[in-house]
Amino acid sequence: MTDSATQFVSPLTFQALSGHPVHHELLNAEVENAMGHISLARWADILLIAPATANCIAKCSHGLADDLLSTLYLAANCPVYIVPAMNQAMWNKAVTQENIQKLQRHGVVMIGPEAGSQACGETGFGRMTEPEAIVDAIIGYSNPLLAGLKILITAGPTREALDPVRYITNRSSGKMGYALAQAAALAGAEVTLISGPVQLAVPDKVLCIQIESAAQMYEAVMANISNQAVFIGAAAVADYSPMQVQAGKIKKQGAQIAINLQKTPDILASVANLPHPPFTVGFAAETHDLEAYAKHKLAAKNLDMIAANWVGQAEGGFDSHENALQVFWQDQQKSLPMMAKTDLAQQLLALIAQRFHEKNTI
Ligand code: C5P
């Protein structure tokens, strides 16, 4: 417990209700030895901080260690899960988001926050994930169905060069693909990530191959696809690329200019149609007729599963922290409601792992 936590509930109450010892002081020679925080950090299999305030997150992201909890975080070598809980404006503040991203770059897994009405009377993202859902998330991250599985994931946008200084691209941030890679690696899968240019750090224990264009992504996928059990095409691959890349910078001309584009190779369909394809999962980002387009792609590209999401809406989709997915396979479907992409990744992977094993035991 932090000092603030003890203002809400006394350590004695917490101890009586939980039936477990409660630690809250960094240096208390009477109760524990002076190095108690180090032995606590070594003892733990995981460190879960719930609820984590904006202050606690800021301290962890800056390496401050002025109380037991922040010191534990610094001393811990085990997987760390943080469950944010704060006012929606504090959550949306740029500095909080920077702190969150920094912790994620350092391998910390975020669970939530959820959207809804808050203790302060406001509505938005910042509610702590319910305790049962936190437990489910942690169990999901150690999903034994994923352990040892070889998974190839594409993520991010591609860049299609027009000339040495310009390119065509899209709004993909890569967050979904990177969240999938992180969740799969945490569960013990052997993950290769083929990524377009993004502002994200490669998750721990993930082999990342950086590419720029759709053609390069195709080459990298095909060079690494053999022996993969699962392929997830989360990248927003450009559908068309300029027919010619000009050697010099294109000069300003008349009022209009035309660029001829040609279709890029469909990486997902190419993988799904290999003689011995892995379990192949595609994404479908749509502005309309989501279900019809997703089901059509599932069949037309010969996929095992497709995860469809709306784009161009007020919330979710490209470049957003959260998203909702409608997942289709065979003649079945499942809705994964609006939630943090990190949580969504874990739930989608659980579904993929379950279907993969069902398919391979038939
Ligand atoms: O057909 P559409 O582009 O909407 O399909 C989206 C899915 O196909 C995504 O999973 C995306 O990664 C994949 N894709 C691909 N290669 C392309 C275009 C899309 O792998 N050239």
Image (tube, rainbow, N blue to C red):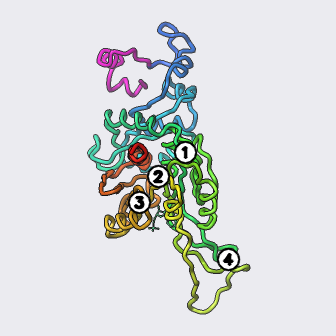
Task: Identify the residue shown where x is 49% and y is 7%.
Answer: 30
Task: Identify the residue shown where x is 64% and y is 90%.
Answer: 253
* Image x and y of residue 286, in percent: 38, 67
Q: Amino acid at mark 4?
A: Asp
Within 10 Å of the Cα at label 3, are there few (<14), some (14-19), or many (20+) other Cα atoms? many
- Residue that label 2 marks: 279
Q: Amino acid at mark 1?
A: Lys
Q: Amino acid at mark 3?
A: Gly
- Residue that label 4 marks: 163
Gap between marks 3 and 4, in whole Å? Answer: 30 Å
Mark sitting earlier along the chain (1/3)? 1
Mark sitting earlier along the chain (2/4)? 4
63 is within the stretch colored magenta: no
Mark 2 near mark 4, Cβ–Cβ under 8 Å? no
Give the residue furthest to the right.
248
- Residue that label 1 marks: 150
**Disc 3 residue lies near ligand 1 with CB under 8 A:** no
Mark sitting earlier along the chain (3/4)? 4
- Residue that label 3 marks: 317
* Image x and y of residue 38, in percent: 56, 19
Q: Is residue 171 above or below residue 78?
A: below
Which image quadrant for residue 292? bottom left
Q: Which residues are magenta?
A: 1-23
